[in-house]
Amino acid sequence: MKGLIAALLLAGGAQAEVRFEDRSEALPEHIYNGGWEHFVGGGVAIFDCNGDGLPEIFAAGGENRARLFLNRGEFVFEEGSLPDLTGVTGAYPLDLDGDGTLDLYVMRVGEDLALKGHGACHFKDATQGLGLPVSDQWTTAFTAWWEPGADRPVLALGHYVDRTDPDGPFEACDTNRILWPAQTGWRAEVLSLGFCPLSMLAAEDARGRMTLRISNDRHYYVRGGAEQMWDIEERRFLGPEDGWEGPQLWGMGIASRDLNGDSADEVMLTSMGDQLLQIAEGGGYVAAPFEMGTTAHRPHEGDDGRPSTGWHSEFGDVDNDGRPDLFIAKGNVDQMPGNAMEDPNSLLMQQPNGTFREVAGRAGVAQSARSRGAALADLDLDGRLDLVVVNRRAPMGLWRNVSDAGGFVTVETPPGLGGRVQLRTEDGVQSQQITVGGGHAGGEALPLHFGLGNAPRAELRWRPPSGDWRPWQTVDAGGTLVLTAPR
């Protein structure tokens, strides 16, 4: 924390204004809707399913059909073909069977689905064919990782309230599950205790160990629960003896990113009220000071002074200045009177001195619908991160980034590749982990994106999980490094 706090005291320079153009009309109208089982969820998955480099959009629908929107370039989208799927809370793109083609793990209220990709954005229900064990639980969180030498991933599933409990919903949180690859399909293991998770992320923690982080909703666990950390190698929950005392939050989403170049990720946890940024320090975490500007605890526009409700959060360098920025989707659960009803989304730009400044209003992305899932992704391949947002009981939002931005490089990572990528220029060091999970009910399978500012080139290297750093490679601004090393 000392290095990051010290950065707050440094003088900063001028920044170009960030600007987005509302292109929501480019998407066919789609609304995430439903009763109390769809107060949560509403995720969006972004991935290229036909090999043209342009990312497609899969959007959960709740009681409405889930939709796939094909990217034809220049912000032209048309509807693709999917099985008729309802009850969907979200989805994550990943290669489930090791054939090199991206599939979709689809989370539902009820039995989940595996949609196998067959190229050209063609998907078929392969839940039984892949040997995926499913249950009738209410899935609201997902993450995955690959064990050394494995073709198929380990899947972690977070299940919300046990709908069969006659004494529910309060204090009726369901158990979670981990699906381990077996000879045919996966073998299910119950992970208990569960405290109503709304996000999971398997990643290296501040200790440098692969850990399953679980963000839980205290609205239903009521007491006795907390944010959880489960050591993947030792297969046990961390506790105070490990330096972990999980905070109690209305946990909604997880975002993870190295903010100070030390190759240890800071972690943003969204909630009702304050959003909690945890700074990696000495193998553990400390809460970021209020002065960093990351709490986003009240609406930044309008006169509704009640607490905000945060959902999907995601780091991304929106202006390509070499400093990760932060988007937070916000919106009332439904009609909760203690929280803001007019709750515009937040775009927090990291300043040269390490603090964050709210710019969503000026940037044009301060939508006040009940937002849920979202994604920062370069949809038109111009090197600038665009924005997609799924809303509850309102149409989706889509914005094109038209900022005057700096240079960038991307890193293509084959399906199933994990570890960390490090980038350095004269301005310093950046790093990103290669993960599947986090956010709120959805994520991306896209090249890693790094902003370069004015640097004409950068050096990059990759470290596999539990391995050594590979040699540095030089990439010019606007270029792409393709990682081909085996797991």
Image (cartoon, rainbow, N blue to C red):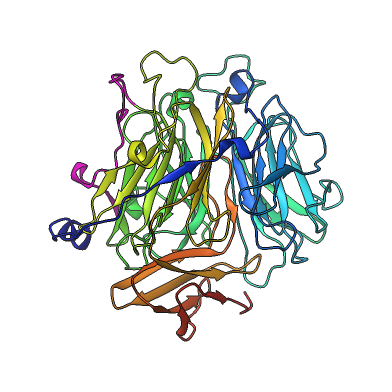
Q: Quadrant of residue 322?
A: bottom left
Say whether residue 368 is magenta: no
Q: Position of residue 361 (x, y in %)?
A: 35, 36
Q: Compared to 334, does 433 lie above or below?
A: below
Q: Position of residue 63 (x, y in %)?
A: 70, 24
Q: Quadrant of the C terminus?
A: bottom right
Q: Compared to 193, does 161 lie above or below?
A: above
Residue 193 shows in the view: no
Say whether residue 293 is magenta: yes
Q: Quadrant of residue 317?
A: bottom left
Of residue 221 and residue 87, the one placed in the foreground of this image is 87
Q: Which residues are magenta?
A: 285-307
Looking at the image, how many numbered discs can be counted on the residues? 0
Of residue 239 and residue 251, the one placed in the foreground of this image is 251
Residue situated furthest right in the rendering: 129
Q: Position of residue 229 (x, y in %)?
A: 45, 49
Q: Residue drawn 23% across and 59% down?
A: 352
Of residue 381 and residue 281, the one placed in the foreground of this image is 381
Q: Residue drawn 49% across and 76% down?
A: 462
Q: Residue drawn 32% across and 42% down?
A: 359
Q: Compared to 74, does 424 lie above or below?
A: below
Of residue 299 and residue 406, the one placed in the foreground of this image is 406
Residue 417 shows in the view: yes
Q: Position of residue 19 (x, y in %)?
A: 39, 47
Q: Quadrant of the N terminus?
A: bottom left
Instruction: Label the magenta part by its dominant secondary structure.
Output: loop
Q: Residue drawn 29% across and 78% down?
A: 426
Residue situated furthest bottom in the rendering: 471
Q: Specify whether 139 is left or right of 4.
A: right
